[in-house]
Amino acid sequence: MSAIPNDRLYAKSHEWVRISGTLAEVGITDHAQHELGDLVFADPAPVGKAVRAGDPVATLESVKAASDAYAPVAGTVAESNRKVYDDPSLLNSDPYGQPLVALDLAPGFDAAAAGLLDADAYAALIGEKG
């Protein structure tokens, strides 16, 4: 498995979020892509879709399973990464470099209240040594 980047937060459902001002990029972790296997389909949510924390932001299918990726935070889809729609294997080869969507954060967003994990806590959750 690849190193878990320290510049983002993690959901227990294996999504990452990188917050910059009022924008939050959301993707799947290396652990998630490893568990799914070779991805053959990825359909990120469309621009303009409002999501609450826990709502799906992408549909993913692999040779092993179909799954949704969930929003760790609430917001409105500002960008949808259509590159992963055209080539889902990008999520296998570079899960931390390929966000699924970027969200305009909901007003009043509080990272501390979102219940997200830092890199060390996420590593402990999945049983990796830091």
Image (tube, rainbow, N blue to C red):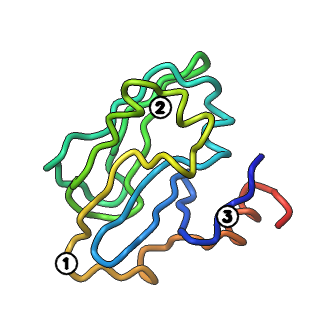
106 relative to 62 in the view: left or right: left
Q: In the rendered structure, find residue 122 and report the number of the disc placed on it.
A: 3
Work out which residue is located at the far right of the displayed protein and give it.
129
Q: CA distance from mark 1 to mark 2?
A: 29 Å
User: Where residue 49 sits in the image (x, y, percent)?
Assistant: 17, 48
Element at badge 2? Answer: strand
Q: Residue at x 57, y 51 (%)?
A: 96
User: Where residue 73 sits in the image (x, y, percent)?
Assistant: 36, 64
Q: In the rendered structure, find residue 67 and report the number of the disc placed on it.
A: 2
Foreground pick, 62 / 21? 21
Element at badge 1? Answer: loop
User: Dot 2: within a 10 Å radius of its alpha carbon, few (fewer than 14), some, or many (20 or more) residues?
Assistant: some
Q: Which residue position holds label 1? A: 107
Name the residue type under label 2.
Ser
Q: Residue at x 67, y 64 (%)?
A: 122
Upstream in sequence: badge 1 or badge 2: 2
Q: In the rendered structure, find residue 31 and report the number of the disc placed on it.
A: none
Name the residue type under label 1.
Pro
Work out which residue is located at the far left of the displayed protein and give it.
48
58 relative to 27 in the view: left or right: left
Q: 108 above or below 67?
A: below
Q: Residue at x 32, y 78 (%)?
A: 21
Foreground pick, 69 / 84? 84
User: Dot 1: within a 10 Å radius of its alpha carbon, few (fewer than 14), some, or many (20 or more) residues?
Assistant: few
Foreground pick, 49 / 12? 49
Q: Residue at x 71, y 61 (%)?
A: 125
122 relative to 115 in the view: left or right: right
